């Protein structure tokens, strides 16, 4: 498990504890773990089995939780979903026809988060995606104010 994943899991568990107003002792009791195991887990020292046990005993999925702020793949800029969520949605893409420069084509597009590609992707809206699976990824430079 990567360090960023561990950090996100710990943050998600801390948010859960705060939202439920649970002390470490109360959380340990509900998760059926020792207080020292919880203390270690909250500093990032845990195994996947520990998270499995916590999720099973609490009935909460922290690895697929909205409590985790998703981070894009490094080659896309390692941006946080919470920073770019406003770009999700539908829009029109206008471009000149390559063969007839006086003509403009309009395409219905959408931007959405892809867990498979770990980032925002752009794809054609309203077409049969089983036949046409073309898409593009969206990259952001660090501290970028805009994207093109």
Image (tube, helix red, strand yellow):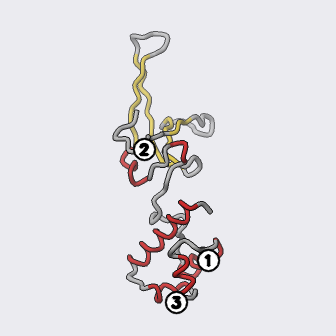
Q: What element carries label 2?
A: loop
Q: Is residue 125 above or below residue 48?
A: above
Q: Does 81 sit left or right of 33 as displayed?
A: left
Q: Which of 93 and 86 is in front in this view?
A: 86
Q: Distance between the residues labelled 1 and 3?
A: 14 Å
Q: What element carries label 3?
A: helix
**Image location (x, y in percent) of residue 78:** 49, 48
Residue receiving disc 2:
142
Q: How far apart are marks 3 and 2 (CA)?
A: 41 Å
**Image location (x, y in percent) of residue 63:** 55, 66
**Residue at image point 61% right, 79% down:** 53
Q: Is residue 143 above or below residue 124?
A: below
Q: How crowded is mark 2: few (under 14 residues within 10 Å), some or many (20 or more)?
A: few
Residue receiving disc 1:
50
Residue receiving disc 3:
29
Sequence-wise, the earlier of marks 1 and 2 is 1
Q: Quadrant of the N terminus?
A: bottom right
**Image location (x, y in percent) of residue 39:** 52, 81
**Residue at image point 52% right, 68% down:** 9
């Amino acid at each position: 498990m990567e360090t960023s994943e561990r950090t996100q899991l710990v943050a998600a568990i801390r948010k859960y504890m705060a939202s439920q107003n649970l002390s470490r002792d109360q959380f340990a009791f509900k998760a059926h773990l020792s207080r020292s195991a919880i203390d270690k887990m909250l500093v990032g020292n845990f195994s996947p089995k520990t998270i499995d046990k916590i999720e099973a005993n609490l009935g909460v999925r922290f690895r697929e939780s909205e409590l985790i702020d998703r981070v894009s793949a490094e080659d896309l800029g390692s941006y946080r979903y919470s920073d770019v969520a406003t770009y999700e949605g539908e829009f029109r893409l206008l471009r000149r026809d390559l063969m007839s420069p006086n003509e403009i084509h309009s395409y219905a597009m959408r931007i959405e988060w892809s867990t498979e590609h770990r980032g925002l992707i752009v794809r054609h809206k309203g077409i049969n995606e089983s036949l046409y699976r073309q898409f593009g990824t969206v990259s952001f430079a660090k501290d970028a104010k805009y994207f093109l």
